[in-house]
Amino acid sequence: MCRYGINAYKPHYACFECRKTFKRRLLTDIDRDSREFEKQSYKCPECNGATVDMGLDFESPKKSDLKAWNHMKNLYETGITFHSCGCTGPGYIPKDKNKLIDFLKEKKEVYIKNLRFWTTRVEPKNENEKNKDWNKNNYFLFNLPKEFTTGTKKKKKTDLKKAVEYWTERVNDIETKIIKITESNV
């Protein structure tokens, strides 16, 4: 049953310093009518350091397995966690450092394709061009956050400069993550 069901799953929080996980009580455990979840940070009961929400499907490695814990930390730092309702699973999770680097490189290529699209983009001028544009480029148009688009449905305009900045930042961010993971000793 999913998070909002009778037997709600508990989020798994990890402390990378202590190499331990903890299940966090939810507000719904106290007030069954409430659907709000606490947003405050959760500290490790052992070292009082910060813990991170690794998701409902996270299974912690053995405490002694430093390599696996470092890999989990790398996954978290690159935005990969184990969030799902348990029904479909969290999606692809790279199993080791090399697979994580390959996964990030593939993601970087997707970001570069988006960046190339937005750097060469010419906005359509009429309804016919807009329809053709949507049919041809809907993948790129759909992947851009809505805050870069202004106007009404019929007179929609994209801020090309912000779109280029957005994808440039994403490419640079993922390059930094790849370098950091590549240079790590584990």
Image (cartoon, grey):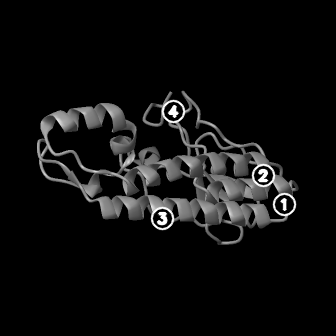
- Amino acid type shown at disc 4: Asn
Instruction: Work out how far the residue at label 2 is from the one at label 4, CA to CA, in angstroms.
Output: 35 Å
Residue 51 visible somewhere in the drawing: no
Instruction: Work out how far the residue at label 1 is from the one at label 4, CA to CA, in angstroms.
Output: 38 Å
Which callout, 1 or 4, points at the residue further toward the start of the chain? 4
Which callout, 1 or 2, points at the residue further toward the start of the chain? 2
Asked if disc 4 and disc 3 are in contact, CB closer than 8 Å, the reply is no
Q: Position of residue 166 (x, y in %)?
A: 41, 61
Which callout, 3 or 1, points at the residue further toward the start of the chain? 3
- Amino acid type shown at disc 1: Val
Question: Could you say whether the residue bearing mark 2 is in a helix, strand or loop?
Answer: helix
Q: Give the residue at x 17% y 48%.
A: 156
Disc 4: which residue: 7
Q: Give the residue at x 64% y 51%.
A: 104
Q: Position of residue 12 (x, y in %)?
A: 61, 49
Disc 3: which residue: 169
Numbered tag placed on residue 186 in the rendering: 1
- Whether residue 29 sits left or right of residue 94 in the image: it is left
Asked if disc 1 and disc 2 are in contact, CB closer than 8 Å, the reply is yes
- Whether residue 150 sits left or right of residue 35 in the image: it is left
Mark 1 Cα-neighbour bin, 10 Å: few <14, some 14–19, many ≥20: few
- Whether residue 66 sits left or right of residue 134 in the image: it is right
Question: Could you say whether the residue bearing mark 1 is in a helix, strand or loop?
Answer: loop
Disc 2: which residue: 97
Q: Give the residue at x 11% y 42%.
A: 154
Q: Give the residue at x 45% y 54%.
A: 115
- Amino acid type shown at disc 3: Glu
Considering depth in this image, is 56 or 108 the residue closer to the camera?
A: 108
Mark in the foreground, 3 or 1:
3
Which callout, 4 or 3, points at the residue further toward the start of the chain? 4
